[in-house]
Image (cartoon, helix red, strand yellow):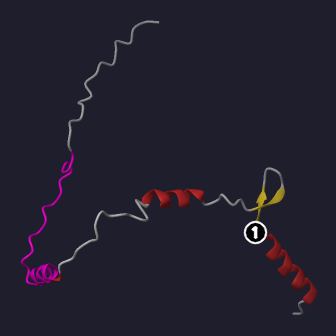
Amino acid sequence: MNIDPKRAMLAALAVAALSGCTFDPQTGRIVPVQPELGEASKQTFAAQVVDPDPHYPAPATVSGDQTARAVEAYREGKVKEPKAPTPTSGLSGSGGSGSGSGGSGGTR
């Protein structure tokens, strides 16, 4: 099987030229990829970042002795199990009961 080098080069150039384009079926034309594609993913990521550069009032202090005691207690099984959360734990305030009147329907 012989491959014509000119045709192979032409095919490679066509693939490279069209790799950054898409076909618009409404106009029947090849159009460049829109730069705003993927904005939903970027927006979702940004919404999950609380504060990328937090500022604290004072530097965090860590006690090596306290950390060592905590690790030792964990290894010896002396750590208290946390209480399992309930579906309503942490909620405050009161919710409405939704007891409203739907109306009588009336006549028109």
Q: Please say if 82 is above or below 70.
A: above
Residue 94 lies in quadrant:
top left
Label 1 sits on what residue type?
Gly
Image quarter for residue 107?
top left
Does residue 93 show up?
yes
Q: Secondary structure at mark 1?
A: loop
Q: Nearer the viewer, residue 14 or 3?
A: 14
Residue 57 placement, left or right of 69: right
Q: Position of residue 86 (x, y in %)?
A: 17, 53
Identify the magenta region. 65-91
Q: Position of residue 77 (x, y in %)?
A: 8, 80
User: Looking at the picture, how far across and down is residue 2, in whole percent?
Assistant: 89, 93
The quadrant in which the N terminus is found is bottom right
Q: Residues within 10 Å of mark 1 (few under 14, many from 20)?
A: few
Residue 72 lies in the magenta-colored region: yes
Q: State the residue at coordinates (13%, 65%).
A: 82
Is residue 108 located in the magenta-colored stretch of the structure?
no
Q: Residue at x 17, y 78 (%)?
A: 63
Give the residue displayed 23% in from the left and 74% down from the top.
61
When the figure is inspected, residue 56 is found, relative to residue 25, above or below; the finding is below
**Which residue is the extreme one toward the bottom?**
1
Q: Which residue is mark 1?
A: 20
User: Is residue 4 in sight in this rendering?
Assistant: no
Query: Residue at (15%, 82%) from the top-left corner?
Result: 71
